[in-house]
Amino acid sequence: MSSGTEQSARENTGHSAENPWPVRTVARKIADWIHRLGAVWVEGQLTQISARQGTQTAFLTLRDPSADVSMTVTCPMRILRSVEPPLREGASVVVHAKPTFFLGRGTLSLRANEIRAVGIGELLARIERLRKLLAAEGLFAVERKRRPPFLPKGIGLITGRASAAERDVLVNTSARWPAARFQVINTAVQGAQAVPQILRALSKLDSDPDIDVIVIARGGGSVEDLLPFSDEALCRAVSSARTPIVSAIGHEPDTPLLDHVADLRCSTPTDAGKRIVPDVREETERVHQMRDRARRALHGWVDTQCRLLDQLRSRPALADPLGPIQRRSDEVALQAQRGTRAMMTVLTREQAALTSARARLAALGPAATLARGYAIVQYSDPEGNLRVLRSVSEVAEGTPLRVRMADGVTHAIANGETGE
């Protein structure tokens, strides 16, 4: 049996630890499966271009700008030279390629038969489509934006290493508030590495409880240079961050999508340094003004209360508290005197009336008659009551009589004699 027949028999009988496949078999099967795949259009950023003189094949590295993923692309040199303008590292391209597996190295690559550079117009059109999509999802809504704290205890800064943007933010912030504390993370701010590094830095700062605001800063540049700050993955990460995000990208005319998603958009990195912290001189002056206003308000209130107390003290009830009592006491005494005089007048008048009545009563009473020599003879009736004797016929002879005269009482006994 030939070697090819033996190999086919081993492949058809399966594989196991006792009957393993050789590397070439596995590599060939993978290659056969990959080679059945069709061609595909792929978009990415060129991070490396290897085109040596005298070779027929160029090697490119195509990277996803939103993820740490890259693939090798091979193409004939004539295709690479035909692209206008000439391709450079960092350029965005669209490649029509077919997956290819190289048996010798066991590597996967894309074999390109057409390469198109993505022009400025196409980039702007894609950014506009993404802008409309994110706006429709509400990522640009004003009501979802958070106000950065008045005085953050910690400031996160994502920017390029030793860049003018980093210097502008740090210098202007420290000039306004010298005690500002920064945590700076330097990342790539353009090219294929920018978005993944910025995303990692954003995640780290957003999870730090000591960071109250995060600034993403970069100086000006071309549309291609600022392209990472219009990346969809970065925009969505900024939208979902819990910490307020400040965007300070480029100059005033530059408006990447990050400016719309961020909680605060600053026209330049210098402007960001002025807006994330207050000015210590202005705040000190404001404190002094507030102290002066508080002092004036307190003095005004005290003066008002003093005037009120003076008004209260000037009222008669408080200026001379015993005066009304004394006046009321005099009035009571006067009324008492009037009452006494009225009572004495009434008593005198009644006393005189009583004396007059007594005189009239005495003149009409029996005592006055007795004083003139008359007497009152009384006898006792059968019940023992004294009765005035008015007729001699009322008593019998021998009846005891009681004779009352002006100066006393004597007793007598009736006899039978009668006369006038």
Image (tube, helix red, strand yellow):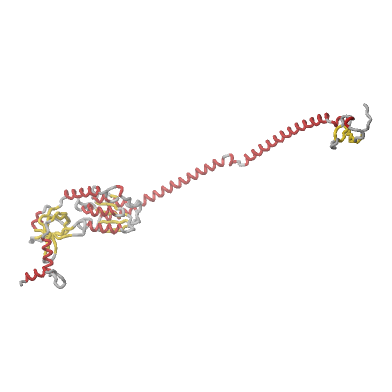
Q: 187 or 245: which is nearer to us?
A: 245
For the point 71% across and 33% down, the residue is 342
Q: 320 or 36: which is nearer to us?
A: 36
Q: 299 or 243: which is nearer to us?
A: 243
Q: Where is residue 381 in the image (x, y as percent from the top left)?
A: 86, 35
Q: In which quarter of the image is the N terminus?
A: bottom left
Position of 403 relative to 6 (above/below): above
As drawn, which residue projects farthest toward the right? Answer: 417
Q: Can see residue 161?
A: no
Q: Can see residue 126?
A: yes
Q: Is residue 249 left or right of residue 374?
A: left
Q: Position of residue 244 (x, y in %)?
A: 31, 53
For the point 72% across and 34% down, the residue is 343
Position of 168 relative to 26 (above/below): above
Q: Is residue 406 left or right of residue 80?
A: right
Numbered disc total: 0
For the point 51% across and 44% down, the residue is 305
Residue 103 sits in which quadrant? bottom left
Q: Position of residue 192 (x, y in %)?
A: 20, 57
For the point 84% across and 37% down, the residue is 383
Q: Position of residue 347 (x, y in %)?
A: 75, 34
As drawn, which residue projects farthest toward the left? Answer: 2
Residue 338 sits in which quadrant? top right
Q: Quadrant of the C terminus?
A: top right
